Amino acid sequence: MDFVRVQPDTSVAGARALMRSSNMRDLVVMDGDKLAGVLSQLDLYLIQTLTEAEPESAVVEEAMATQPYVVRPDVSLAEVVHTMWKERYGSAVVVDEEQVVGIFTTADALLALSQVLAAETGDALDAGTLIKDVADYNGNERSE
């Protein structure tokens, strides 16, 4: 599992540029070998819109989530995806024996879903399930 990492003292502008160049929406924040947090595109947006914040001089530590959702590599995909949906997490940091080994994002969850649907139907584009059956559609409430 490959992931992009930054340090807490990285500038917000530098993190934004890294997100663009790596095509990632979530960055793992590492303080040396220790997980410090996760920085998402939403975090960057929020720090830019805060009236008291100075985005030009802000650093990652000021914008990141300091309590990211952390999972072991042997946790089931279903459990991780369900928790991400239920808690509205955008990612899960994968940690094996106190070492960060990757990050699982909503994009990864969508890839996994497409692979499951393709395996069940033989064609991911004709999976048989309508988007209105799984999305928040016309105000319908989602169930757990």
Image (cartoon, helix red, strand yellow):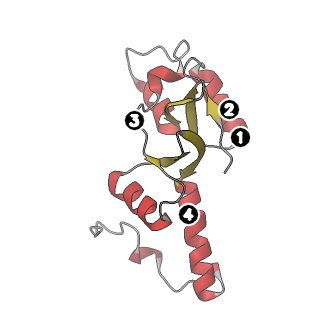
- The circle on residue 110 is 4
Q: Is residue 21 above or below residue 84?
A: above
What residue is shown with label 3?
Answer: 67
What residue is shown with label 2?
Answer: 18
Q: Picture coordinates of residue 60 (x, y %)?
A: 53, 23
Quarter assignment of residue 81:
bottom left
Q: Picture coordinates of residue 39 (x, y %)?
A: 51, 34
Question: Toward the viewer: 2 or 87?
Answer: 2
Question: Toward the viewer: 79 or 122?
Answer: 79
Residue drawn 62% across and 82% down? 119
Of circles 3 and 2, the one toward us is 3
Question: Toward the viewer: 99 or 113?
Answer: 99
Q: Amino acid at mark 1?
A: Ser
Residue drawn 37% across and 14% down? 52
Residue drawn 56% across and 83% down? 127
Q: Amino acid at mark 3?
A: Gln
What residue is shown with label 1?
Answer: 22
Q: Picture coordinates of residue 92 (x, y %)?
A: 49, 48
- Circle 2 Cα neighbour tier, 10 Å, few/some/many (<14 / 14–19 / ≥20): some
Residue drawn 41% across and 73% down? 134
Q: Is residue 63 visible?
A: yes
Q: Amino acid at mark 2?
A: Leu
Comes first in the chain, label 1 or label 4: 1
Of circles 4 and 3, the one toward us is 3
Comes first in the chain, label 3 or label 2: 2
